[in-house]
Amino acid sequence: MTQDSTPPAADVSEPLASHEMSPEEFDEIDAILDEMRTRFDETPQWEFCEGFMAALVCCRRPIPASEYIDVLLDVSEDGPSEGSFADAAQRERFMQLWDKRWSEVVTALDTEIKALDDEAAYQPEVMDVRGAIATLSEEERAAMADDPVPAFAQVWALGFMFAVESWPEEWTAPRDKDAAKWLDAALQAVVALTEDDEGEPEMSPFSDDAPPTMSLARLNTFVDAVWAVYDLREIWRSIGPRVETLRKEATPGRNDLCPCGSGKKYKKCHGA
């Protein structure tokens, strides 16, 4: 018997929407993050948030939004912080969109599929930054020459691992050796995606007609990482949440001296 470890995405009572996120809604959540970045330049891109969310969905313990949103965005409900939302309405709208995408990711990861090109499969929202740069003018590309350009899905993987590193106790290897190996292999598949793509560009991730921006090896690494997310979801659903070990203090024997210091035997004192 398995236990569903799906945490509620936010501390709200509204039901999660069942239909898919629209392009306009992804644009809206991007716009919220862009606005927040004007006040706190370390506010992450949505791709990073998407990876962070995927890790939370797979996490062993259901972590509430009140705990993880501050970790992700450096915001707080208790008072102003560097990355605070502009107002309560902006926060509420962000969480509505977050919940909707959360529901979408959970549904995808809990649906049995045969291949990642299945319409029901989890499709991370990632960008081909190198492809976007290739469409810019020569002057615009020259102005960005010194800026680091992430590889395909690298930011998503970094967001995923940020969540893992933020709650390391929830990703501790289980006692079962086979499960521990399965967990390690899955995490290593995601870690591989955090690395740069140093291979020769051979293809475009989204269009056969676009200029090549990534290697075939990168595509294979991405595919392995997405399958790894399915594995991680299944591992913790099968094992269930961590159970804290209760440590009971040793009780003195009946003929031992009572620990209270009375000099009497335990059975004649506090053990009576």
Image (cartoon, rainbow, N blue to C red):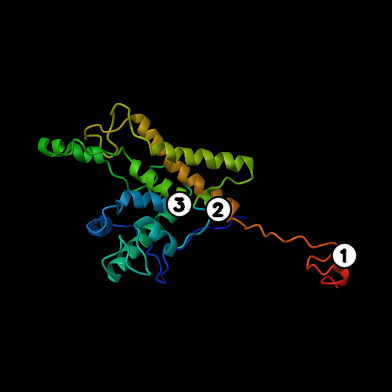
- x, y percent for residue 100: 36, 61
Q: Which residue is mark 1?
A: 254
| Three-letter residue code for mark 2 | Arg
Q: CA distance from mark 2 to mark 1?
A: 45 Å
Outermost residue, top side: 200
Q: Quadrant of the C terminus?
A: bottom right
Residue drawn at (36%, 34%) of the image:
219
Residue at 34% of width from left, 34% of height from top? 196
**Mark 3 element type:** helix
Q: Residues within 10 Å of mark 3 (few under 14, many from 20)?
A: few
Would residue 101 be found to the left or right of residue 2 on screen? left
What is the spatial separation of the Cα atoms under label 3 and label 2, in whole angstroms?
20 Å
Looking at the rendering, which quadrant does residue 222 occupy? Answer: top left
The mark nearer the N terminus, 3 or 2, is 3
Going by the numbered disc 1, the residue's amino acid type is Arg
Q: Secondary structure at mark 2?
A: helix
- Asked whether 78 or 114 is in front, the reply is 78
Residue 86 locus on image (x, y percent): 26, 66
Image: 251 above or below 165: below
Residue 177, x across and y down, in percent: 63, 40
Residue indicated by mark 3: 166
Label 1 residue SS: loop
Number of numbered discs overlaid on the protein picture: 3
Q: Which residue is mark 2?
A: 237
Label 3 amino acid? Ser
On the image, the x and y values in percent for residue 126 come to: 32, 45
